[in-house]
Image (spheres, rainbow, N blue to C red):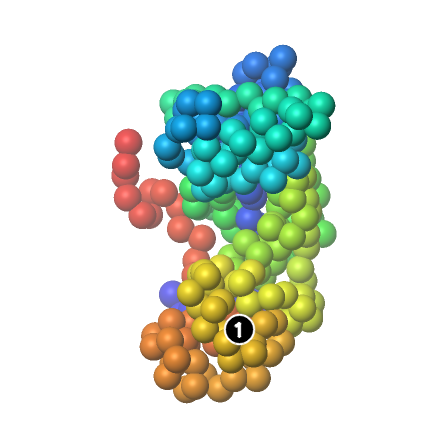
């Protein structure tokens, strides 16, 4: 098996934009473009539970996923007072989203072969056999177009030499983004980011780093591995590698992982 060589690998990360909301808009064309929140019942502002997904029109009101649904309801009321359309609240229809997801993943597998379903709306594709970033871009552009045509959903794509870089890249230009980070550009790309943009860095790690006056990946890279291990234990050495864009994690197909369903 002999390890993975980043000089050979090309990985794409595809992330559907506002997936649940986009699926609902495609299934109910009269909702297209309206502020849409998928999640718990708002019960006129007294509802418990959270927002699962907000459409981009709803995000313009300050609504975002994981926010309390009552807060989303109040933001909708506030927007209405300014003469803007009210938010349409819908319950989660997981069966529908899972079905659309399954069909999209099948298209990905048919076109690429090596596909890891990272979640219901995210996948990693190993494009290494194409040997060329330009050819990869062309292939993914075609896939992106067919998803939009078939399901009315846009996706944001990141292409890079490994899963870590592809994942960060796909988050850079949402929605409908397309960000390609070549091997030569990895260091420059990462150094400009805030530490929070490294996958796995949550509010806790960010807080610790910020207290030590470390805000960007460039600043993080000045810290020795041993020091990061003192601060964070095992996670410190993982963080050290991530700050340098190092990631050997292979794209694992469902078949290799398990046989659920
Ligand atoms: Mg998504």
Please say whether residue 139 is visible from this viewpoint.
Answer: no
Q: Using the image as rendered, state which of residue 40 and residue 170 is in the foreground.
A: 40
For the point 27% across and 39% down, the residue is: 259
Please say whether residue 255 is visible from this viewpoint.
Answer: yes
**Based on the displayed image, in which of its 4 quarters is residue 161 positioned?**
bottom right
For the point 37% across and 83% down, the residue is: 230
Horizontal placement of 161 versus 95: left or right? right
- Residue that carries the numbered disc 1 in the rendered image: 210
- The percent position of residue 223, horizontal first and vertical second, equals 52, 84
For the point 68% across and 52% down, the residue is: 179
- The percent position of residue 132, horizontal first and vertical second, equals 67, 56
Q: Using the image as rendered, state which of residue 206 and residue 10 is in the foreground.
A: 206
Q: Label 1: few (<14), some or many (≥20) within 10 Å? A: few
Horizontal placement of 163 versus 182: left or right? left
Q: Give above or below for 72 relative to 221.
A: above
For the point 42% across and 23% down, the residue is: 43
Q: Using the image as rendered, state which of residue 164 and residue 173 is in the foreground.
A: 173
SS for tag 1?
Answer: helix
Q: Give above or below for 106 relative to 115.
A: above
Horizontal placement of 142 versus 101: left or right? right
Q: Is mark 1 within 8 Å of ligand 1?
A: no
**Based on the displayed image, in which of its 4 quarters is residue 79 positioned?**
top right
Which quadrant holds the N terminus?
bottom left
Which quadrant holds the C terminus?
top left
**Based on the displayed image, in which of its 4 quarters is residue 16 positioned?**
top right
- The percent position of residue 96, horizontal first and vertical second, equals 43, 21
- The percent position of residue 234, horizontal first and vertical second, equals 34, 75
Q: Residue lying furthest front in this view?
A: 81
Horizontal placement of 139 versus 68: left or right? right
Q: Using the image as rendered, state which of residue 223 and residue 176 is in the foreground.
A: 223
């Amino acid at each position: 098996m002999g390890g993975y060589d980043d000089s050979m690998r090309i990985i794409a990360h595809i992330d559907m934009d506002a997936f649940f909301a986009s699926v609902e808009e495609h299934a109910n064309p009269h909702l297209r473009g309206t502020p849409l929140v998928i999640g718990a019942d708002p019960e006129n502002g007294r509802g418990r539970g959270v927002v699962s997904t907000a459409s981009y029109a709803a995000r313009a009101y300050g609504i975002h996923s994981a926010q309390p649904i009552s807060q989303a309801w109040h933001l909708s009321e506030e927007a209405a007072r300014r003469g803007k359309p009210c938010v349409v609240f819908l319950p989660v229809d997981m069966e529908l989203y899972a079905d659309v997801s399954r069909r999209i993943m099948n298209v990905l597998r048919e076109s690429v072969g090596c596909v890891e379903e990272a979640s219901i709306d995210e996948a990693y594709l190993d494009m290494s056999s194409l040997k060329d970033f330009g050819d990869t871009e062309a292939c993914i552009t075609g896939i992106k177009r067919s998803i939009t045509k078939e399901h009315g959903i846009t996706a944001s794509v990141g292409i890079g030499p490994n899963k870590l870089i592809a994942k960060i890249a796909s988050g850079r230009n949402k929605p409908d983004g397309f960000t390609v980070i070549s091997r030569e550009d990895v260091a420059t790309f990462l150094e400009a980011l805030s530490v929070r943009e490294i996958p796995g860095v949550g509010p806790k790690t960010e807080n610790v780093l910020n207290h030590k006056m470390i805000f960007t990946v460039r600043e993080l890279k000045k810290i020795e591995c041993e020091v990061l291990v003192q601060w964070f234990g095992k996670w410190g050495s993982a963080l050290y590698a991530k700050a340098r864009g190092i990631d050997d994690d292979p794209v694992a197909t469902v078949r290799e992982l398990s046989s659920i369903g």
